[in-house]
Amino acid sequence: MSWFRRLLGSDAGRDRARAGNNELDALERAVGNRRRDDAAVLKKVRKAARDYPQDPEIALLAAGFYYSVGMYTESRAAYRLSANGEDPAYALTMIAASHVEQGDLDAAHEQLIDAQTADPASPDFSFWQGVLHDLDGRNKAAMACYRRAALADPDEYFVPPRLSEKEFQGLVHKVFRKLEKKYEGFGQDLQGRNVDVQVQSTPTRAQIEDDDFHPLWLGVFEGATAVERSIEDPWSAMPGRIILFQRNLERDCRNLKELAQQVEITLLHEVAHAHGREEDWMEDRGLA
């Protein structure tokens, strides 16, 4: 189950070392607000963590927030404390997930051993084990993990669609033709900017180990953006490329219809990067 649905139900045995239900509810509302001011929420999260440094429920909420805003070192510390709570396997799994987010797959593998020991039937463990199998290129093993996760917790997890490389290339080509019809000059613009569209099954190890790269990205633009090109810098005129990561895209979708929609959004997102647009601009237009 998702992290802000993992609150302990009982208030029995609480003392001042543990937050009350009202405090927990207020913090949950703050971290769960999609329109939140992250700086303001961070202040509330840190205050709650200071006030109740040993409360695993507060730690779990704090860990989830830290994770959501990319504060992975802080999230690991909070998840370790929350492992003393009701669902240690989830907390230990999310420590592994934070390592994945930062591209440290070896640390993630090691951490998942602890999560498996805590609860080998945990759907969270199964899902993230599948993610690691995907990134290691073990497609069949990954799908077996996703099936176990979906069977154990169908409200939270699902079995993603899987296509052959040829089938996925065909889907991307179909989406590209749709965009060319919808936006006149779409393909010509990419050709004129010397930007190619490519597909990779998963990111390479070299990409994953790059500090500026995110292993779970759905796609990436590599090259000089429109605003970075300059006649004074001949390297900025080198060909660029948009890479779509097939397994990451599939894992994000429940069916082929969702997959086609996500490919379209991701392709437009990376084209916007090629034009020098930032994430805020894309979020305002539903491309993030």
Image (spheres, rainbow, N blue to C red):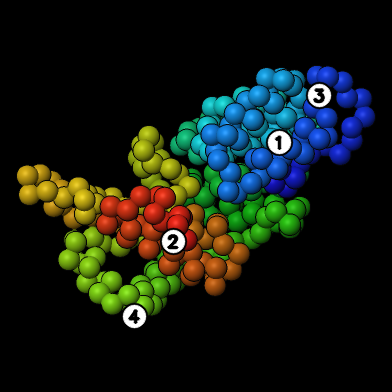
Label 2: how many Cα within 10 Å (few below 14, some 14–19, many 20+): few
Q: Is residue 115 above or below residue 258?
A: above
Q: Amino acid at mark 1?
A: Leu
Element type where label 2 sits in the image: loop
Q: Position of residue 145 (x, y in %)?
A: 64, 51
Indicate which disc, 3 or 2, sits on the residue closer to the N terminus. Answer: 3
Q: Amino acid at mark 4?
A: Lys
Residue 46 as seen in the image, left or right of residue 107: right
**The quadrant where residue 9 appears:** top right
The reply to whether callout 1 and callout 3 are in contact (CB within 8 Å) is: no
Q: Amino acid at mark 3?
A: Arg
Measured in 3D between alpha carbons, the distance from the residue under mark 4 to the one under mark 2, in whole angstroms, is 19 Å
Indicate which disc, 4 or 2, sits on the residue closer to the N terminus. Answer: 4
Q: Amino acid at mark 2?
A: Arg
Which label belongs to residue 81?
none
Name the residue at 64% across, 54% down.
146
Indicate which disc, 1 or 4, sits on the residue closer to the N terminus. Answer: 1
The reply to whether callout 3 and callout 2 are in contact (CB within 8 Å) is: no
Which residue is disc 3 drawn over? Answer: 18
Which residue is disc 1 drawn over? Answer: 27
Name the residue at 39% across, 69% down.
172
Label 3: how many Cα within 10 Å (few below 14, some 14–19, many 20+): some
Residue 117 in view, yes or no: no
Q: Position of residue 257 (x, y in %)?
A: 54, 72
Which residue is disc 4 drawn over? Answer: 181
Measured in 3D between alpha carbons, the distance from the residue under mark 4 to the one under mark 3, in whole angstroms, is 59 Å
Measured in 3D between alpha carbons, the distance from the residue under mark 2 to the one under mark 1, in whole angstroms, is 29 Å
User: Which residue sits furthest bottom?
Assistant: 181
Measured in 3D between alpha carbons, the distance from the residue under mark 3 to the one under mark 2, in whole angstroms, is 42 Å
Residue 13 as seen in the image, left or right of residue 182: right
Which residue is disc 2 drawn over? Answer: 285
